[in-house]
Image (spheres, rainbow, N blue to C red):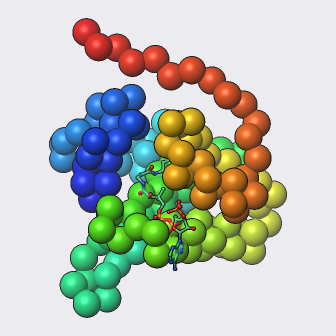
């Protein structure tokens, strides 16, 4: 799902793990099993499943980066299921869960060129706190 969601995507230029199934599995292992980006929080992470086909069509993964701060490490929806509110529902499910558990903040990073995602986060009242460069090694 990750490779399909990021095919031709600007983030796949930055994170080459998104190009292949093995790379995406490595990414997932790092996020879920190792504390590379906070501690994975299964309770506030969700999968979106197509009821008919029963296949995975979207996901949101959240980690805990401080006792009361969550961080979205991954949110993606398959291209053919986009613009139907699934991304927004996934973010709403995560923030509702965190709020219930007393978290005070939810953060994420997004590439500026990913205009659709930026617009979605702005619409959901995420504020921009810091802008930083991403460097790509093309060696
Ligand atoms: C970012 C991403 C997760 C958003 O998922 P999504 O399911 O398309 O998100 P939503 O449908 O909730 O909202 C996106 C758009 O749909 C529109 N929309 C939401 N519900 C809708 C509905 N019922 N009918 C029509 N349009 C709708 C929104 O207004 C929004 O407008 P836009 O298309 O002009 O941006 C998805 O585009 C994606 O997977 N992108 C690739 C991976 C990625 O960039 N992830 C984020 C990394 S930070």
Q: Quarter-wise, where is residue 47 in the image?
A: bottom left
Image side of residue 27 versus residue 96, left or right: left
Q: Quarter-wise, where is residue 5 in the image?
A: bottom left
Residue 104 location, x and y as percent?
81, 57
Q: Is residue 43 visible?
A: no
Q: How many marks?
A: 0
Residue 18 location, x and y as percent?
29, 41
Q: Residue 4, relative to residue 22: is it above or below?
A: below
Q: Is residue 5 visible?
A: yes
Q: Quarter-wise, where is residue 44 in the image?
A: bottom right
Residue positioned 29% across, 36% down in the render? 17
Residue 61 location, x and y as percent?
48, 57
Q: Nearer the viewer, residue 91 or 120?
A: 120
Residue positioned 27% across, 59% down in the render? 1
Residue positioned 57% across, 20% down in the render? 133
Image side of residue 61 versus residue 17, left or right: right
Q: Residue 2, relative to residue 84: is it above or below?
A: above
């Amino acid at each position: 799902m990750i490779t399909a969601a990021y095919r031709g995507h600007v983030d796949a230029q930055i994170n080459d793990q998104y190009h292949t199934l093995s790379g995406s599995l490595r990414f997932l292992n790092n996020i879920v099993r190792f504390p590379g980006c906070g501690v994975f929080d299964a309770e506030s992470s969700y999968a979106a499943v197509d009821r008919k086909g029963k296949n995975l069509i979207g996901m949101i993964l959240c980690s805990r980066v401080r006792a009361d701060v969550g961080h979205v490490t991954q949110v993606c929806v398959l291209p053919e299921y986009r613009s139907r509110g699934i991304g927004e529902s996934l973010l709403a499910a995560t923030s509702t869960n965190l709020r219930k558990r007393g978290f005070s903040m939810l953060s994420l990073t997004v590439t500026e060129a990913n205009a659709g995602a930026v617009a979605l986060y702005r619409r959901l009242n995420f504020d921009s706190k810091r802008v930083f460069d991403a460097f790509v090694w093309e060696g």
